């Protein structure tokens, strides 16, 4: 009986190469190149993270030394504790969590409701509204900042003395009126089987019941994609929270990091450690939702 080096390889029948292809020397060379390029690009992707981590463990002299070393001479792991105690990261993380949670809920709920109305209910003027939303998507978001700030101020959500999370409402609603998320939902809803919705209506379900009991359960893939997009966008959002949230106790992580960078008392090596803390939640989220993120990237350019 032939003993295979890779026990699972002998059972491989699908994919770019199957087990029979590996017996060909040319295919083995090609497979070696594939593995090499995968390792190379993995290193390119991980290098910035490792560079930031190792640099944050160096002292000021090592960072500015003309004789550069990739690894620190002294591994000062205690700097993690000192920076955590110096900077109120617990508050920044809490504010960011509240901001991200509200942004995800608004992005999923309001954009899906609008897409449901346009794609399935199709009221009078639905095509005009759809074209208007698409035209709005073509306008750069930066051009909307000034009129948006004026509207936020007019409704009383620009109060520097308030410490309430209600000040986040204007930021949350911005994610609830996102043209890109709307188009993702609309494209997905148009491909849902109409027979199920008609059956629900015949059983006595109203339009909202059809939406919550039939459309949303069938749309879990796109719900996850939009939720991930809103999660990453709100976590890294800076400009609008910087302009709207004027109370220091409400500032999310990215705004807090910007303010720390403007202080003269913060050492460069300590600021690098702050950047390490800012990447930790993103890495954790990617490890948890990596399959959904990969599926989201693959499905953006495909249509069933």
Image: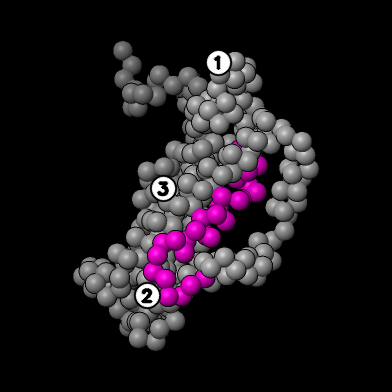
Q: Is residue 222 left or right of residue 62?
A: right
The part of the image, by quadrant, that contains residue 127 is: top right
- In space, the residues marked 3 and 2 are separated at their CA atoms by 24 Å
Callout 3 crowding tier (Cα within 10 Å): few <14, some 14–19, many ≥20: some
Residue at left offset 56%, top offset 44%? 110
The numbered mark, 3 or 1, whose residue comes first in the sequence reads 1
Q: Earlier in the sequence, mark 2 or mark 1?
A: 1
- The answer to if 166 sits in the magenta stretch is yes
Q: Is residue 34 left or right of residue 279?
A: right
Q: Position of residue 97 (x, y in %)?
A: 38, 56
Quarter where residue 255 is shown:
bottom left
Please determine whether, in this image, residue 118 is positioned above or below residue 246: above
Q: State the residue position of label 3.
A: 286
Across and down, in percent, residue 183 comes to 65, 42
Kindly identify the residue that appears in the image at 53 percent across and 42 percent down: 109
In the picture, the disc for residue 271 is 2
Mark closest to the chain's N terminus, 3 or 2: 2
């Amino acid at each position: 009986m032939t003993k295979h080096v890779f026990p699972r390889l002998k059972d491989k029948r699908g994919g770019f190469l199957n087990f029979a292809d590996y017996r060909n020397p040319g295919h083995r060379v090609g497979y070696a190149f594939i593995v090499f390029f995968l390792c190379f690009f993995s290193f390119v992707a991980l290098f910035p993270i490792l560079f930031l981590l190792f640099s944050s463990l160096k002292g000021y002299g090592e960072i500015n030394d003309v004789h550069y070393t990739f690894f620190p001479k002294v591994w000062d792991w205690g700097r993690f504790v000192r920076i955590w105690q110096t900077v109120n990261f617990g508050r920044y993380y809490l504010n960011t969590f509240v901001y991200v949670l509200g942004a995800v809920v608004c992005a999923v709920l309001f954009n899906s409701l609008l897409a449901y109305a346009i794609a399935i209910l199709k009221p009078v003027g639905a095509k005009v509204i759809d074209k208007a939303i698409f035209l709005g998507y073509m306008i750069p978001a930066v051009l909307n900042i000034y009129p948006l700030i004026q509207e936020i101020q007019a409704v009383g959500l620009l109060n520097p003395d308030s410490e309430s999370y209600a000040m986040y409402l204007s930021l949350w609603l911005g994610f609830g009126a996102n043209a890109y998320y709307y188009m993702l939902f609309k494209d997905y809803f148009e491909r849902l089987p109409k027979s199920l919705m008609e059956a629900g209506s015949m059983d006595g379900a109203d339009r909202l019941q059809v939406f919550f009991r039939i459309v949303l359960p069938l749309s879990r893939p796109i719900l996850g994609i939009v939720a991930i997009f809103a999660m990453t966008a709100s976590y890294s959002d800076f400009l609008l929270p910087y302009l709207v949230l004027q109370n220091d106790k409400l500032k999310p992580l990215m705004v807090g990091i910007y303010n720390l960078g403007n202080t003269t008392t913060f050492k460069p090596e300590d600021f690098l450690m702050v950047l390490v803390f800012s990447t930790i939640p993103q890495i954790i989220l990617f490890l948890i939702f990596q399959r959904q993120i990969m599926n989201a990237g693959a499905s953006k350019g495909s249509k069933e």
